[in-house]
Image (cartoon, helix red, strand yellow):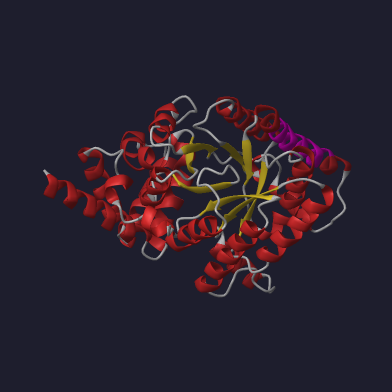
Amino acid sequence: MNPTSIVSFDNTAVAFSSKSDAELLKMYWMFKSMNSNAFVKIGGGLLNTAIKLHLPVKFIVKPTIFNHFCGGETIEESGKAIQALGNYNIGTILDYSVEGEGDEKSFDTTRDEILRTVARAKGNKNIPFSVFKVTGLIDIDLLEKVQQKKELSAAERGAFERGRDRVDAICRSCHEAGVRVFVDAEESWIQDTIDHLAYQMMEQYNTEKAIVYNTYQLYRHDRLKVIQRDYEQAVRQGYYLGAKLVRGAYMEKERERAKAQNYPSPINPTKQASDELFDAALRFCMQHLDRIAICNGTHNEKSCYLLLDLMAEQNIDPSDERIYFAQLFGMSDNLSFNLANAGYNVAKYVPYGPVDAVMPYLLRRANENTAIAGQSSREFSLIRKEMERRKAKA
């Protein structure tokens, strides 16, 4: 049977089945606002200023944009979101979204918080993954220096080993708890260092199945070759490759740096090139499921349909644990809820942290929704369609 006849991403009754009429109306006004470039730019600037001046904006932010895109201020407060998603067979990926101070104490604090997400996930079918950024555990300048193969001082070598130990503590804890973990992708000038840390963790903890997943940003033109290389290495060294595929999150920064430092941009020249590379990577991973576990981390409907088609062609059950779909909390519920309703493995990235600390994340989400061609408009049109459907049914 054709998967598109089983799953329709236009089915708003399923997409918004968890939302009351009041919640849907609230979403309507929020996405209507985010459709306005001027509103997002001016509003974001005002919020940033208010936070810097320590003005009391939490009472405005928390019930609105924060509650829509975040689970809560703590793991405990995120419990309601975890259960609400779990009621519809959607998993939660607890994402500690606080940007640290960049010192050893901050790195230890972040490690301990990630370990708490692992403890919360242990034995909980509603939390199939944990996640962390290596820059939350190791100084970014040190990661870059290692990538450039510069000689490290004794103090720097010690700092890097402490950072590696933090990464290992998280991955070891995940292995012991039976919880899979994503190592998030970051900027190209530190990504090789992050990759090598991920490979070390996979070699150690992925001998029986994929526990540690590296993240591949397919807006980088070399990433398919890297996935192919990593697969061959996994086969040679006898471990499973965990691969989370995303399009990417640092495009403007990458292009600006490449131009400023006069080196070729690592980013694909067009969106179409990125889309084609992403889908080629999906095909490659599906051809090598004997050794690769996949997370299809995308809000792109065509790429989701492609994976459904590939699974159908290979007669792979929707619930096969080697294949997951993932989207961000508060976005693309038409994908997440319809996929989960059809029996596919789905998880949502659910950020959490104190309101003030998570504001940079929230402002990026608002800007991305505005900047991504049609993203806010797509969300808004689906919400409006569901409101009209409910009105007609009443």
**Image quadrant for the C terminus?**
top left
Magenta stretch: includes residue 371: no
Where does the magenta region start and end? 158-172
Q: Left or right: 44 with respect to 221?
A: left
Question: Along the line of sight, which residue is nearer the eye, 280 or 53?
Answer: 280
Please tell me whether the stretch drawn in magenta is mainly helix, strand or loop.
helix
Question: Along the line of sight, which residue is nearer the eye, 282 or 328?
Answer: 282
Is residue 216 positioned above or below 324 on the image?
Answer: below
Q: From this viewpoint, is residue 45 visible?
A: no
Q: Position of residue 161 (x, y in %)?
A: 81, 39
Is residue 90 positioned above or below 120 on the image?
Answer: below
Question: Along the line of sight, which residue is nearer the eye, 139 or 87?
Answer: 87
Q: Left or right: 61 with respect to 280?
A: left
**Image quadrant for the N terminus?**
bottom left
Residue at (27, 47) in percent of width and height: 13
Q: Position of residue 338 (x, y in %)?
A: 38, 48
Question: Along the line of sight, which residue is nearer the eye, 251 or 226?
Answer: 226
Residue at (41, 35) in percent of width and height: 85
Tell me which corner region of the image, top left, top right, bottom left or bottom right, holds residue 373: bottom left
Q: Left or right: 200 with respect to 267?
A: right
Q: Position of residue 38 (x, y in %)?
A: 32, 61
Q: From this viewpoint, is residue 195 visible?
A: yes
Tell me which corner region of the image, top left, top right, bottom left or bottom right, holds residue 256: bottom right
Q: Position of residue 41 (x, y in %)?
A: 37, 57
Is residue 146 positioned above or below 58 on the image?
Answer: below
